[in-house]
Image (cartoon, helix red, strand yellow):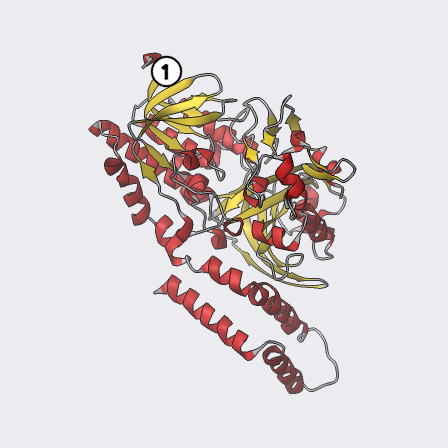
Amino acid sequence: MNIDDRLAKVKYVSDEETHLKINQEKCNNCEMKVCTYICPANVYEWNKKENKLTVNYENCLECGACRIACSEKCLEWQYPKGICGVTYKFG
Amino acid sequence: MDNKNKTQVIVVGAGPAGISAAITVAKAGKEVILIERGNFSGSKNMFGGAIYTQPTKEIFPDFETSAPLERNNIKHNYTILTEDESTSITYRDNTEHSNSYTVIRSKFDRWMSEEAKKAGVILVTQTVVRELIVENKKVVGVKTELEDYYADIVILADGVNSLLAKQIGLRKDFDPKDVALGIKEVIKIGKDKINERFNLKDNEGCITEIFGYPMLGQLGLGFMYTNKDTITLGLGITLSELISHKIKPYELLDKLKEHKTIAPLIEDGELIEYSAHLIPEGGYKKVPKLYDNGVMIVGDSASLVNNLHWEGTNLAMLSGKFAGETAIFSLDKNDFSKKTLSLYKKKLDKSFIMKDLKSYKDLMPIMHKQSKSFLDYYLRKINKFFKMFTETNSISKRNNFHKFIFETITERNIFELLKDGLHIIKLLWGILK
């Protein structure tokens, strides 16, 4: 099943600004780019055209896997604001 | 200090650990504020899941008659999958005894928080604690997005990521091998179909632990739980495995769903939610410093998980209770030093919580080392063993058995077999001595 179909079932309230701050320079030089495959919500995608990492923070499930897995330890990871982010109906 | 923002105890995080801590404090007539970042308790939480009956009763004695429960788990399946085979054994309890119930966290945690409010806990939702306030080497309060709150004691129940415990140096960041990523789907099937497919009646439930495929040789397990009219299907896999194998977690879940042993159980089901959460799996050796001046950490924040036995929420609830009792003791003494709060650690050490974690302290290191054997080789052999009893091939049984034994020994280096044996002995010795 497509990840987008899965995420379509999740209830979110998007914030205007990201709670996941990357360091584009370090990301450019990062060989592993672990975040682009371990994230269960596919938040991080490598944009080959523009040679940069895009962060679809509004899809974040707030699990924290990227924070721990990032080999460069350059991710500034915070919880979204109190009213924002994911709200599980089941969980 | 502004008195209106000063209370006796602040608990950060309204999950099972935080709520249990808060309710314990409130029941002793002390002031307690419970701060939750989600819209309501449970709105950011996810687990397999089932809650265990006995430990839940310790916090909520009447929960079986008043809490929103899904099914009473009478069946427990252990299923070993390889690509195109599976072997299952099932334990079934036909007595009236209840061991565990499946629950929907957004309903159950919310119910727990309502019970806490009834006991006098002040619940503040939609509020993220960004930082702890430390004065003279003592935690004296919390900074939220809007206001600062002060307290004699702060209990950290802010979950597996516990950024707050990290801020004050009680905890370091996880190593990817000490944490698992859990993902799952809630799939709507309908009550009648679930009962038919799992051989259940009324509100009887079934838990399935899935070993092997699609994570053969990796530190990961699948799980399936029956809720009232939905099925939860998911998996947990150590983060370092995802990193080193470059796997997308949801692609593993796809493979699990498509396995011929699993697929018929969820056939025609409708996906109604997808979720993800981390599980602390470092075990005893990675339990952080549990208290300091004015602060204690409980539940997942303190890495209190016994993964082999699928225990987490029960350790969360009981550690919360112990922290609550310790808070009451130190409030009565009017002493919030780490020396007084060390009572919390003593209570944990004396309980089964630390005893169990200690017993299993070698489990994860061994599993990391021997995952190819215990989570691949032997699982395949178990399926092959049972296969021998299902087919006749016009070869004598003795020859078949000899061939099976010969292959089991020769397909794997004899030293590896010995190593496996020694590891098992070490593990059993650690648990039983």
Visible residue check, residue B59: yes
Q: Is B121 above or below relative to B394?
A: above
Farthest residue to the right: give it: A49
Q: In x, y percent, where is residue B321?
A: 35, 37
Q: In x, y percent, where is residue B96?
A: 48, 48
Q: Residues within 10 Å of mark 1 (few under 14, many from 20)?
A: few
Count of numbered tags: 1
Q: Nearer the viewer, residue B324 or B241?
A: B241
Q: Secondary structure at mark 1?
A: helix
Residue occupying the point 79% across, 37% down: A49
Where is residue B30, by image quadrant?
top left
**Residue B405 relative to residue A8: left or right:** left
Q: Nearer the viewer, residue B214 or B310?
A: B214
Visible residue check, residue B71: no
The C terminus of chain B lies in which quarter of the figure?
Answer: bottom left
Q: Is B308 above or below relative to B386?
A: above
Where is residue B8, by image quadrant?
top left
The N terminus of chain B lies in which quarter of the figure?
Answer: top left
Q: Nearer the viewer, residue B258 or B58?
A: B258
Residue occupying the point 60% across, 31% down: A21
Q: In x, y percent, where is residue B429?
A: 38, 67
Check the residue under mark 1 and report the chain it is in: B
Q: In x, y percent, where is residue B131?
A: 43, 27
For badge 1, the amino acid type reads Asn
Residue occupying the point 59% across, 41% down: A66
Find disc 1 in the rendering and name its residue: B5
